[in-house]
Image: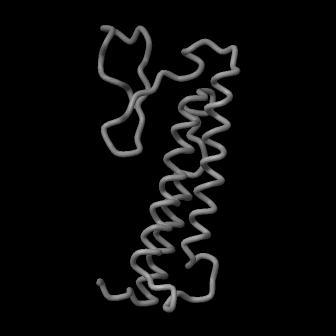
Amino acid sequence: AAPAPSMNALQDALSQFQAHVALFRPVPPAAAPHLIAQACHWSFVADQFRIFGQLLEERLPQSSRPDSPLTQPSYYYECAAQFAIKQRAAWEATRTSSASPRDLGDVQPGPFVGQVSRVVAGGGGGGGPPQP
């Protein structure tokens, strides 16, 4: 078993995670009008919270966690669930939307885990690589 991280390391991890999700929590402006891109975005954000909760649970014994909600894995699991609800709502909106497929966003898995790419229709040579 790995030794428990120090409180300084825990505070550093919490600060880094909060800075990380602050960058990614808002829906990117380019994705806002595209329902499928929104769903993918919320899935990514939910995964970030779920994975951080798992890291806390696996690496920080409950007995050594300070009495703060931000050091409890359950807080991050709850946040992940809330973002999963937003993801589900975006997917459901695609089913009931009268928008054209282009308005929904033609996305494919991106080159990195959790990243998606948008395919630009009629983009110069047809069948080109996805555009980020």
- Give the image location of residue 100, x and y in percent: 61, 12
Q: Residue 70, relative to residue 38: is it above or below?
A: below
Q: What sort of colour scheme is used for the picture?
A: one colour
- Against 87, residue 122 (above or below) is above
- Residue occupying image coordinates x 34% and y 9%: 124
Lateral position of residue 44 relative to residue 79, left or right: left
Residue 84 lies, in percent from the top left, at: 60, 48
Residue at x 30% of width, y 83% of height: 2
Q: Observer-nearest residue: 3 or 17?
A: 3
Where is residue 77 shown, x and y percent of the image?
57, 63
Q: Residue at x 38, y 87 (%)?
A: 4
Quarter of the image with the C terminus in it: top left
Q: Position of residue 39 (x, y in %)?
A: 57, 36
Q: Quadrant of residue 117?
A: top left
Q: How many marks?
A: 0
Q: Residue at x 48, y 53 (%)?
A: 47
Q: Is residue 36 left or right of residue 85?
A: left
From the viewer's perspective, tell me whether residue 9 is left or right of residue 128: right
The residue lying toward the viewer, choosing from 51 and 22, is 51
Image quarter where the N terminus lies is bottom left
Q: Is residue 71 above or below residue 63?
A: above
**Which picture quadrant has residue 109?**
top left
